[in-house]
Image (cartoon, rainbow, N blue to C red):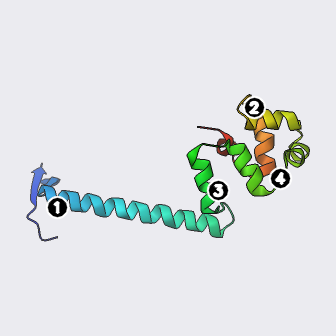
Amino acid sequence: MNAPVQIIEKDGKPEYAVVPYEEFRRLLQLAEDAEDIRAADAARLELQNGEDESVPADVAEQLLNGQQHPLRVWREYRGFTQEVLAQMSGVGKSYISQIEAGKKTGSAKVLRSIAKALQVEVEDLLGA
């Protein structure tokens, strides 16, 4: 850093550093970049350790665009029919159909059971 820095002291000890605004913005960008790198490294480690998974771009797009209920997107991505998911989660097929259609929201207990069967977090099943 070659910018002029003014140090303001209190009781003989440095308390503040005053830098030109452009230098402040540059330092802020560097800090944000470092934070992004840390987050990416953490995500990569979670993937390597099997604590998270990557999903294809088209599945991510479906989850983000909100045109289909997330339950349906995850169910289809996992390759389950409503009947198979119903058996795996102990939830009625018609209940799953109603949640996917937006006619029911699903109780916390039901969503936990479905999430476990789909190997996702309950939050992943909540529509926007």
The answer for how far apart the CA atoms under marks 3 and 1 are is 41 Å
| Residue type of the residue flagged with mark 3 | Val
The percent coordinates of residue 26 (x first, y second) are 22, 62
37 displayed left or right of 128: left
Q: Residue furthest right?
A: 87
Q: Residue at x 72, y 44 (%)?
A: 71
Q: Residues within 10 Å of mark 3 (few under 14, many from 20)?
A: some
Q: Of tags 3 and 1, which is closer to the observer?
A: 3
Identify the residue position indicated by label 2 in the image: 106
Q: Secondary structure at mark 2?
A: loop
Q: Locate residue 128: give its quadrant.
A: top right
Q: Residues within 10 Å of mark 1 (few under 14, many from 20)?
A: some
Choose the circle earlier in sequence order: 4 or 2. 4
Choose the circle earlier in sequence order: 3 or 4. 3
| Residue type of the residue flagged with mark 4 | Phe
Identify the residue position indicated by label 1 in the image: 23
The percent coordinates of residue 16 (x first, y second) are 16, 52
Of residues 45 and 104, the one drawn nearer to the viewer in this rendering = 104
Q: Of tags 2 and 3, which is closer to the observer?
A: 3
Q: Locate residue 67: give its quadrant.
A: top right
Asked if marks 2 and 1 touch (Cβ < 8 Å), the reply is no
| Residue type of the residue flagged with mark 1 | Glu
The answer for how far apart the CA atoms under marks 4 and 2 are is 19 Å
Looking at the image, is 90 positioned above or below residue 84? above
Identify the residue position indicated by label 3 in the image: 59
Asked if marks 3 and 4 touch (Cβ < 8 Å), the reply is no
Q: Of tags 1 and 4, which is closer to the observer?
A: 4
The percent coordinates of residue 124 (x first, y second) are 66, 45
Identify the residue position indicated by label 4 in the image: 80
Q: Is residue 72 visible?
A: yes
The answer for how far apart the CA atoms under marks 1 and 4 are is 54 Å
